[in-house]
Image (tube, rainbow, N blue to C red):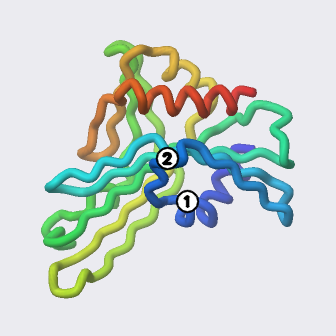
């Protein structure tokens, strides 16, 4: 299932990457492939300065009803820099495909390589560039269980690091309850 999940992410992930703060978890069944895709919004951070950041989780299963636990979940990170974020000024943060790190209760460490990535640039009138970067990480469910067993969970990808707030950690736990079936 892991290979199948990763192969599908190139097609599915871009259409799912938009702020969905109102809907925590979505389930979408595709009758043509007889597969269901489950996505869960974790966080959206749009600071006054710097890139906006979005994190989603995604997993798939065959059929309309999940019969068994999935073996992998995709951790999807999207950074969007706009305005004066010039490409030549180092606006790219994920272009080197950095690994994803988790630190659980300041003692357990996890590292995951980039499974897939996409970058694109566009112009915003005369204001400057829009840089969209997406990195996808495949996290085995056994590792996700260990990560979620902590009370304090932080992650880092490229220059961005963040301690998950309780409500964000709870969103991941809610998805895990479905994932571990």
Determine the image quadrant of residue 61. top right
Relative placement, left or right, of 6 versus 160 is right
In depth, the one of 135 and 16 nearer the eye is 16
Q: Where is residue 154 shown, x and y percent of the image?
A: 34, 28
The residue where tag 1 is placed is 16
Vertical arrangement, residue 175 with respect to residue 83, above or below: above
Callout 2: 10 Å neighbours few (<14), some, many (20+)?
many
Q: Where is residue 97 shown, x and y percent of the image?
A: 39, 53
The residue where tag 2 is placed is 56
- Is disc 2 in contact with disc 1, using a CB cutoff of under 8 Å? yes
Q: Quadrant of the C terminus?
A: top right
> Residue at (17%, 63%) from the top-left corner?
90
Q: Where is residue 43 shown, x and y percent of the image?
A: 40, 43
> Residue at (54%, 42%) from the top-left corner?
24
Q: Quadrant of the N terminus?
A: top right
Determine the image quadrant of residue 95. bottom left
Determine the image quadrant of residue 169. top left
Q: Where is residue 145 shown, x and y percent of the image?
A: 58, 21
């Amino acid at each position: 299932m892991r290979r199948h999940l990763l192969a599908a992410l190139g097609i599915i992930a871009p259409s799912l990457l938009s702020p969905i703060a109102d809907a925590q978890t979505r389930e979408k069944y595709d009758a043509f492939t007889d597969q269901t895709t489950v996505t869960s919004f974790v966080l959206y951070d749009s600071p006054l300065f710097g890139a906006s950041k979005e994190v989603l989780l995604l997993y798939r299963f065959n059929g309309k009803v999940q019969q068994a636990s999935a073996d992998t979940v995709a951790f999807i990170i999207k950074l969007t820099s706009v305005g004066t974020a010039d490409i030549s000024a180092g606006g790219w943060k994920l272009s080197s495909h950095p690994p994803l790190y988790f630190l659980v209760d300041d003692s357990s460490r996890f590292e995951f390589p980039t499974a897939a990535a996409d970058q694109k640039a566009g112009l915003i009138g005369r204001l400057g560039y829009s840089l969209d970067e997406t990195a996808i990480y495949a996290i085995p469910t056994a590792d996700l269980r260990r990560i979620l067993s902590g009370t304090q969970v932080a992650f880092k990808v490229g220059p961005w690091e963040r301690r998950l707030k309780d409500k964000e950690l709870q969103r991941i736990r809610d998805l895990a309850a479905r994932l571990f079936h």
